[in-house]
Image (tube, helix red, strand yellow):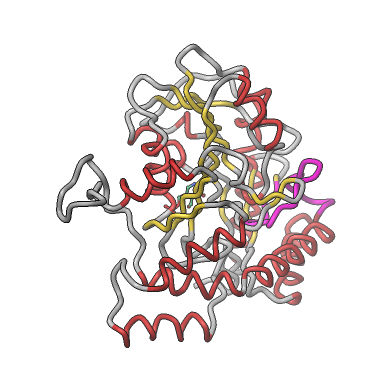
Amino acid sequence: MYQYPVYSPQLGEEEKRNVLDCLETNWISSKGKYVELFEKNFSIFTDIAHSNAVANGTVAIHLALAAIGIGPGDEVIVPSFTYVASVNGIRYVGATPVFADCSRADWQMGVEEVRRCITPKTKAVMAVHLYGSCTDMAALAKFCKEKNLLLIEDCAEAFGTYDHGRHAGGFGDISTFSFYGNKTITTGEGGMVCTQSESIDSVLRHLKNQGVSKTKQYWHDVVGFNFRMTNICAAIGVAQLDRAQQIIQVKKEINQMYEERLRHKLEFLPCGKGIESAHWMVTALAQSEEKRNALRAFLDSKKIETRPSFYPVHLMPMYEQKLDLPVTMDIAFRGINLPSSPTLTENDVNVICNAVIEFYG
Ligand SMILES: Cc1ncc(COP(=O)(O)O)c(C=O)c1O
């Protein structure tokens, strides 16, 4: 058992009350008032016109790609430095992931990294807003428009992140979120697919609900999915949205405390101009992979849980390729995530920082 887990969600009375309401009213499946309310409130929070609640962030990506017509023969440009679910979604719809490097300036895949990967088969670009930051999304959206490419935003880690005042997920054709237990707001398991387009929203709703006809019960006119979120999960989500501003504020303060005390020991994830990160996970680089591993082992011995940053997906057996992605290869092996729960106190962060300082001597 860790004294300082890398993440634990902040749950309270409203979450309990809402879940109890689901149980007491018998609305425990995917019908019930909370799903609609969560979707409505999510759209208000993010200022993205349409939100569709789904079972998790992985199916959100699968559904998003299916809804915008990505399929066999299409290439989708995606950073190798991401969580594997971003890439698996591309494979699920039969398309081909094309791995891009990330920028040294902000560790995200930007226009220049995308440009190098374009081929005549490129159909879409998937930006992944890693660890709560994001690239210059206005520039990437403009570039994709010029090249006639669809733009998907994987915002699993970017709830509460803004680029020049606009919430992540509002730039692309479609965007996805995750509400896994370690995300900035959580529903236990859960996800959201968002779009500004009414026509894409209508395809999303149709596909996520088994492709059932709008006019004839138990008649299905496409091969759809059951990707629906339950009312219980949505009930938690409604309560989490009510406390979202406070969670985000605390997470920003936690990140700032770490940076202030440890910036001479570790290199923290740098944010681009105009990017307001929600700092989902406090992310930093050690001097080498060996140093990172030794630091993790030292913190582990002090009951402080950490995570290694994501390994490059293009090295994993399902996607293995020889590619020249120098920034990814450098960053991915030196990265460490420090405890980032909104439940951490100032004293907790100080204890963790003291341990890091002790390690460096
Ligand atoms: C970048 C990214 N994409 C997708 C996912 C998948 O979300 P989930 O775990 O809810 O399926 C995650 C989360 O774990 C993630 O970090």
Image check: 210 left or right of 283? left
Location of the C terminus by quadrant is bottom right
Q: Quadrant of residue 18?
A: bottom left
Q: Position of residue 67 (x, y in %)?
A: 38, 39
Q: Position of residue 134 (x, y in %)?
A: 67, 43
Give above or below for 131 relative to 328.
Answer: below
Q: Is residue 280 magenta?
A: yes
Q: Nearer the viewer, residue 17 or 347?
A: 17
Q: Quadrant of residue 353?
A: bottom right
Q: Position of residue 125 (x, y in %)?
A: 53, 29
Q: In the image, what residue occupies the spot 35% across and 27% down?
A: 71
Q: In the image, what residue occupies the spot 48% across and 24% down?
A: 98
Residue 267 makes an appearance in the image: no
Q: In the image, what residue occupies the spot 62% across and 69% down?
A: 244
Image check: 5 left or right of 64? right
Q: Is residue 122 magenta?
A: no
User: Which secondary structure is most common in the magenta stretch?
Assistant: loop
Instruction: Give the magenta range.
Output: 263-284
Q: Nearer the viewer, residue 353 or 192?
A: 192
Which residue ends up furthest to the left in the rendered image?
218
Residue 190 makes an appearance in the image: yes
Q: In the image, what residue occupies the spot 77% across and 46% down?
A: 164
Q: Nearer the viewer, residue 49 or 116?
A: 49
